Amino acid sequence: MISELIVALLLVAGGGFAMLAGLGLLRLPDVLIRMHASTKAGTLGAGLILAAVAVHYGGPAIALRAVATIVFLLMTAPVSAHMIGRAAYRTGVPLSPHTGIDELRDVPPP
């Protein structure tokens, strides 16, 4: 009974964060800001859903796979978002007019 409640809470929270990541992709004005929203909320949402799977099935093999996948997401999502954002900036994707600081404006490309 308690484990079912924990699984339900983890799934609802994970789904909510995944929904926020999708909403951020639709509503935010800039590629760099969109990458930030999708990376943070998407990783947290997927991690919570994987934690719910580990709690629900309860076996050590499933839990180990879920933990390994969460660690893999935490290690790769920020790097991939950084590289996509960097590529978007270097190819000239326009920034939002609300972006106040562009520290790379005067830096020549390598």
Image (cartoon, rainbow, N blue to C red):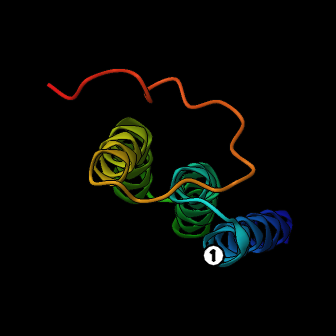
What residue appears at the point 59 percent right and 59 percent down from the top-left corner? Answer: 30
> Which quarter of the rendered picture does the C terminus lie within?
top left
The answer to whether 86 appears left or right of 97 in the picture is left
The answer to whether 55 appears left or right of 61 in the picture is right
> Which quarter of the rendered picture does the N terminus lie within?
bottom right
Foreground: 44 or 96? Answer: 96
Q: Position of residue 68 (x, y in %)?
A: 35, 44
Q: Amino acid at mark 1?
A: Gly
79 shown above or below 48: above
Q: Position of residue 76 (x, y in %)?
A: 33, 42
Q: Position of residue 107 (x, y in %)?
A: 34, 21
What residue appears at the point 55 percent right and 53 percent down from the top-left corner? Answer: 95
64 shown above or below 105: below
- Most extreme residue toward the front, as rendered? 106
32 shown above or below 45: above
Residue 92 lies in quadrant: bottom left
What residue appears at the point 44 percent right and 30 percent down from the top-left corner? Answer: 105
The answer to whether 29 appears left or right of 86 in the picture is right
> In the structure shown, which secondary structural element does the residue marked by tag 1 occupy?
helix
Q: Which residue is mark 1?
A: 22
The answer to whether 71 appears left or right of 11 in the picture is left
Q: Position of residue 91 (x, y in %)?
A: 27, 54
Residue 96 lies in quadrant: bottom right
